Amino acid sequence: MEFDILRLPNGLRVLHVEDANIMTVHCGFIINAGSRDETHDESGIAHLIEHGLFKGTQRRKAFHILTRIDSVGGEINAYTTKEETCVYATALKEHFERAAELLVDVTFSSKFPEKEIKKEISVIKDEINSYKDNPDEMLVDEFEELMYPEHSLGRPILGSEENISSLTRTDIKRFVDRLYKTDQIVFACVGNLSKRKLRSFCKRILEPIQLQESVNVTRVKPKSAEFKIEKKANVHQVHSLIGKSTFGLDDDRVRTMVMLNNILGGPALNSRLNLKIREKMGYCYYIESHYNAYTDCGIFEIYFGTDKRHFNKVNRLIKKELDILKDRRLTDRMLTAAHNQLIGQIAVSQENRSNLMLTLGKSLLHFDRVDSFAEMKKEIESITAREIQDLATELFESGTMSQLSYVPE
């Protein structure tokens, strides 16, 4: 896979991967503005802006935005994370400019009409209530609030019903003016589009966008708390989350962390937690671990749902698997299998070109560079069994893991 990186005079960075073997083009803006950039009073505003981007620009009403791409069989969408807002589209190659020009319009020229914003606040309230109907979603949000108290990383991306009700168009404009700066935005494009056509688009459409440089935009690294809490809830089984705060994307051990997580409870069916607790013992329908990495910190989590009768047994079995990773170094055969599994997962994920576009764009946004597949493969293959064991020893130190559980009433 070959990619080109363009740095435009107005600060925008452009990433391009040409793939002549598909009929479509995937493109999008990745903006360095998420819920962690909100003040307490702005909680939920980054996500509200994501909704508001589609509600009218200087040139288009909401109806014309929503039908511009859909009418030719394409798709346009957006999402908000704790550190980014992403606005992206997919269209046939002949409709690339239609899609990309619309993305430029909504990203840089949205008007955020007050009437439409009020409607979207009502929609988001329904979205918040839908989360409340899912205990596993609520569990994650509450866990992170407890992990990072009084810090924006601990607040839910959607905000609270009370807070978003108080947000106005003036608040939105203030947030956008503060953070939507050209040197903090990447345009990424993957698909059947030549370098010549992309450069032409950049020259005509992207370069005329006015330079807007960020000034004194800093993120404060959160302090974490430890806790063990059980709460009565209207649930049929125990939902539990075990985890701790750890390092982020700025640490050299990130890929080792990803591999350790993969071995313990990653998405594959042969993870140790799945094999032991679900397949062998039958105690859980779903058990999995996750590593959520932010730019300067991260959270490692193990989630499981189980019958109340098995709750303590599952806790003991999880601790046993953590101790094994600390006490027993991987054999050469185990290490090779772990290397191959992670490399294969990355290769499969890159087959999804929309996902690839967003992943590469985020890498360019945060690190100003992009690793090729060959570079990632080489780095993964260099991870040693000792590095994995040392990280497990540090991460799973006795008594340092927090736990939040929802227990049936």
Image (tube, rainbow, N blue to C red):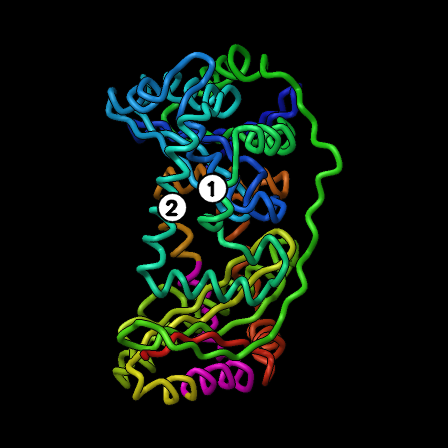
Question: Gap between marks 2 and 1, in whole Å?
Answer: 9 Å
Q: Quadrant of residue 326?
A: bottom right
- The spot of residue 300 in percent (x, y) is 52, 67
Determine crowd level at label 2: few under 14, some 14-19, many 20+ residues with C-alpha closer than 10 A.
some
The residue sitting at 66% across, 59% down in the picture is 222
- Locate residue 271: give its quadrant: bottom left
The residue indicated by pointer 2 is 125
The prevailing secondary structure element of the residues shown in magenta is helix
Q: Which residue shows up at 36% across the image and 25% down it? A: 192
Q: Is the residue 75 above or below the residue 125 in the image?
A: above
Q: Position of residue 89 (x, y in %)?
A: 37, 29
Residue indicated by mark 1 = 165
Residue 344 lies in the magenta stretch: no
Q: With respect to residue 184, does 381 lie above or below?
A: below
Give the secondary structure at mark 1.
helix
- For the C terminus, the quadrant is bottom left
Q: Nearer the viewer, mark 2 or mark 1?
A: 1
Q: Nearer the viewer, residue 129 or 348?
A: 129
Q: What kind of element bears circle 2?
A: helix
Density class for disc 1 (Cα within 10 Å; few <14, some 14-19, many ≥20) is: some
Indicate whether 146 appears above or below 310: above
Q: Are marks 2 and 1 in contact (CB under 8 Å)?
A: yes
Residue occupying image coordinates x 55% and y 43%: 34
Q: Say what amino acid the circle numbered 2 marks.
A: Lys
| Amino acid type of the residue tagged 1 in the rendering | Ser
Percent x, y of residue 52: 44, 30
Question: Against 41, is 320 above or below?
Answer: below
Name which of mark 2 and mark 1 comes first in the sequence: 2
Name the residue: 43% across, 60% down.
342
Image quadrant of residue 115?
top left
Q: Where does the magenta region start and end? A: 317-342
Residue 377 at what x, y percent from top left? 50, 54
